[in-house]
Amino acid sequence: MLAEWSEQGDKQMPLDIGGVISRTFSIVGSRIGSLLGLWGTYFVLQMVLMFLIFGMIGASALSGGFADNPLAMGAGVIGMMILFYIIYLLISLASTASLVHNASPAINPTFGDSFGAGLRAIPGLVLLLLLMIVAYIGAIIVLAIVGAIFSALGDAGTVLFGLLVLVGAVYLSCRLSVMFPVIVVEGVTNPITAIQRSWRLTAGNVLRIFLVLLAFSVLVVVIIFLLFALMGGSMMGLGGMAASGGAGSVGAMGAGFLLIMLVFVILGALMAIVMASFMACLHAALAGPEAVAETFQ
């Protein structure tokens, strides 16, 4: 499959902007059950991790084990928090990877296939993340030096430098936009190979990728704005109930806030699913229509 996709990607097929967006929501609708199941599984894992870590911190504080050595207690808390964030990051990466895998139109995976793919993708994604961090630090150093040279030209040089950096950042974002699904869907474990593969897939389609990213981002922002506008009205209604006083109004307000928290969780799940589906559909579109068509045969 990887060899077939590489051949198709090298053909530099034109990207259908509307097709990517429409296919994204079509995939979400047709696979919502498995996608929600995957998101919920990882969400539970994250919650269990949080309760375990903070439970350990609370138990240590209540037991007084570090009472004679506050520095050791502080070091222990910091160590557990670092461990929490590392494991949380790994679970988050696996969660997004599983969602991208399950949402890819180029394959027809089961829940178990996607869950396993998410776990297997962790090493490659961690290596890619570390490589991006190193590249980012190197870019900051180079840009600082080049920026100082441009600033010597005055305000015009500063503005020109800012524009060049913006254009360069957008260009690189478009060329590297499918690294994640390359690792997850195609099973590439080497981050450098994933970058090269993404570079080949996006060749000749930078402008179209930018337009589809822009259109999708605007659509998502509009949807979020509308949802928050509706929720803002609910919040104002709850505030009015609280201002009226009474035990009943306080209880109703508490129930309302719990409901709003639940809505936020649901919105977070849907946003994660939609974003993962978009990445998967963009990758499948760039890999070639033959790969996408195989799913529905």
Image: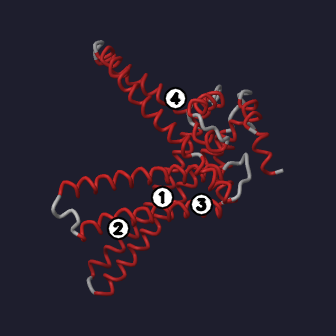
Residue 229 image position (x, y, % from top left):
43, 61
**Residue at label 1?**
226
In the figure, is residue 230 to the left or right of 203? left
Marker disc for residue 89: none
Gap between marks 1 and 2 measured at Cα: 38 Å
Q: Which of marks 4 and 1 is nearer the N terminus?
A: 4
Relative to 291, say whether 53 is above or below: below
Gap between marks 3 and 4 measured at Cα: 30 Å
- Label 1 or label 3, whichever lies nearer to me, is 3
Instruction: State which quarter of the image contains the N terminus.
Output: top right
Marker disc for residue 172: 4
Gap between marks 2 and 3 measured at Cα: 26 Å
Gap between marks 1 and 3 measured at Cα: 27 Å
Q: Is mark 3 on a helix, strand or loop?
A: helix
**Residue at label 3?**
38
Residue 14 image position (x, y, % from top left):
70, 31
Q: Which amino acid does label 2 sit on?
A: Gly
Crowding at label 1, few (<14), some or many (≥20) Cα neighbours within 10 Å? few
Front residue (pair 26, 48):
48
**Res. 73 image quadrant:** bottom left
Relative to 26, say whether 281 is above or below: above
Q: What residue type is labelled 3?
A: Leu
Q: Which amino acid does label 4 sit on?
A: Leu
Crowding at label 4, few (<14), some or many (≥20) Cα neighbours within 10 Å? few
- Label 1 or label 2, whichever lies nearer to me, is 2
Q: Which of marks 3 and 4 is nearer the N terminus?
A: 3
Q: Which residue is drawn at 31% across and 73% down?
A: 239
